[in-house]
Image (spheres, rainbow, N blue to C red):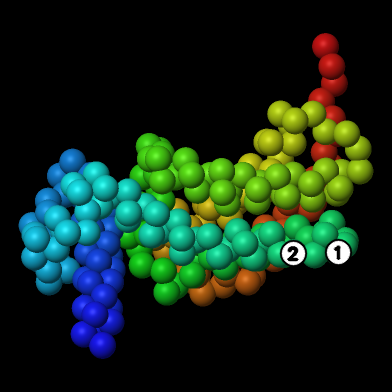
Amino acid sequence: MANVKNNSSAKETKRRLIEAAGEVFAQHGFERATIKEITDRADASVAAVNYHFSDKQELYDQVVQYVHERGDETFKACGDVPTDLPPKERLKAFVAQLVSHVLDPSQPTWRCQIKTREMQHPSAATERFIEQSIRPYVRQLEEVVQDLLEQPVPQLELTRLVNSVIGQCIYYAHSRELLVRLYPDQPSPADVADELADHITRFSLAALSCWRAPAKG
């Protein structure tokens, strides 16, 4: 019984260290983040850091992995969208899942900041996440867009079309604080996530309906 309690306590300490480290890394960046500030926020000792992580770099890698694991459910849910649905319904489901995740009000701000940092400077943990979760999601979205267009699409164009859809969703996540200040009389993006998902779907479908393959030569 004592071992169970000790293991539970160790896991809780590790979780607190990762959460605190995420806040500090997001606020100060990797270079300026200090172990002392992290342990102070986590109410833990330096010895606990040394026990769970070999160095600050491994702690950062664990933070990134922790963030990605919490986002992985979204991509898995997108992967569960029935393939026999009409393409428009599949697109709507994909967008709804992504918007719901990126605008989840229960998600701490620091997680979004870590994701932004990783978009600019991908770590090994992000490289793994790309292969395990993001790439399969993108490929499925490519299939949806291809089905909607009902004609062969050059890969470069297909990539741009898919990125245009994803970009609309990501924009509201990474710009939500700016948008609240820019449009103070309008609801916060997080408060109208379902409406935004519907708007992005309709906007994307309208744009795809007008798409024409670029002329050669």
Q: Distance between the residues labelled 2 and 1?
A: 8 Å
Question: Looking at the image, which residue is at 12% across and 51% down?
Answer: 34
Is 106 placed above or below 84 here?
below
Question: Looking at the image, which residue is at 36% across and 67% down?
Answer: 108
Secondary structure of residue under mark 2: loop
Q: Quadrant of the N terminus?
A: bottom left
Residue placed under numbered mark 2 in the picture: 81
Question: Looking at the image, which residue is at 12% across and 71% down?
Answer: 43
- Neighbours of disc 1 within 10 Å: few (<14), some (14-19), many (20+): few
- Neighbours of disc 2 within 10 Å: few (<14), some (14-19), many (20+): some
Give the residue at the far top of this rendering.
Answer: 217
As shown in the figure, which amino acid type bears the numbered disc 1? Leu
As shown in the figure, which amino acid type bears the numbered disc 2? Val
Q: Where residue 68 sits in the image (x, y, percent)? A: 45, 56
From this viewpoint, is residue 111 visible? yes
Is 200 placed above or below 159 here?
below
From this viewpoint, is residue 29 visible? no
Q: Are marks 2 and 1 in contact (CB under 8 Å)?
A: yes
Residue placed under numbered mark 1 in the picture: 85
